[in-house]
Image (cartoon, grey):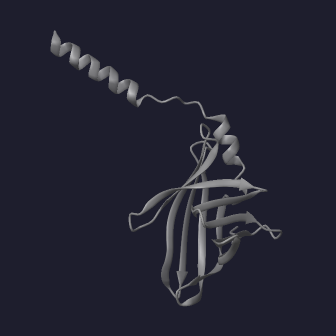
Amino acid sequence: MKIYLVVTLTFLTSIVGFSQTSETDSISKAKIKELQFMVGNWKGTGWMMGRHGKSEFDQTERIEFKLDSTAVLIEGKGLSKGKVVHNALAILTYDKIKGNYVFRSYLPSGLNAEFKAEIIENKLYWYPTENTRYIIWQNEKEQWYETGEYKIGQNWNQFFEMTLDREK
């Protein structure tokens, strides 16, 4: 009898643990839909300042809504002189309990981290550190435009820029 009870409890716990609701979170979906401007396949160029000065690169970004538009999947790859200089995957979601966006980035090195993100005046800001930010928006030519800045004192200084066209 005791073994029957253990097996039954284990089975019921498994069923409850793996069951899912099929309802979409309408709050998260509405917030993620604000990122519609990013969705698509993009291609273009950019530059960044590094230890050895300014370097230029070619960039592609593949952006898709996932999970009934409650998440955004971002896959970016940059090449400079045929060499991969940027290769990352990110998932952007909305945490309705905390009331903010969450930007989780993954690199081929195995590194991954979660960053604060927010929308200000139709631009996505995400912050790898308190003194570093990236800003993504669609410019007047309907291009993906992204800048990266670091803060010294009260001033933000640009170290990165990327302009991409939507592929048709």
In the image, is residue 87 above or below residue 18?
Answer: below
Residue 119 as seen in the image, left or right of residue 127 = right
Residue at the extreme top of the image, as rendered:
1
In the image, is residue 47 above or below residue 117?
Answer: below
In the image, is residue 135 above or below residue 32?
Answer: below
Q: Quadrant of the C terminus?
A: bottom right
Q: How many marks?
A: 0
Residue displayed at 59% across by 37% down: 97
Residue at the extreme right of the image, as rendered:
140
Residue displayed at 55% across by 68% down: 76
Residue displayed at 53% across by 80% down: 79
Foreground: 120 or 90?
Answer: 120
Q: Quadrant of the N terminus?
A: top left
Residue 101 as seen in the image, left or right of residue 166 = left
Q: Position of residue 24 (x, y in %)?
A: 61, 34
Residue at the extreme front of the image, as rendered:
153
Q: Position of residue 99 (x, y in %)?
A: 64, 41
Residue 9 as seen in the image, left or right of residue 112 = left
Foreground: 8 or 162?
Answer: 162
Foreground: 138 or 150?
Answer: 150
* Residue 28 in sight in this render: yes
* Residue 164 in sight in this render: no
Residue displayed at 71% across by 54% down: 119
Foreground: 124 or 83?
Answer: 124
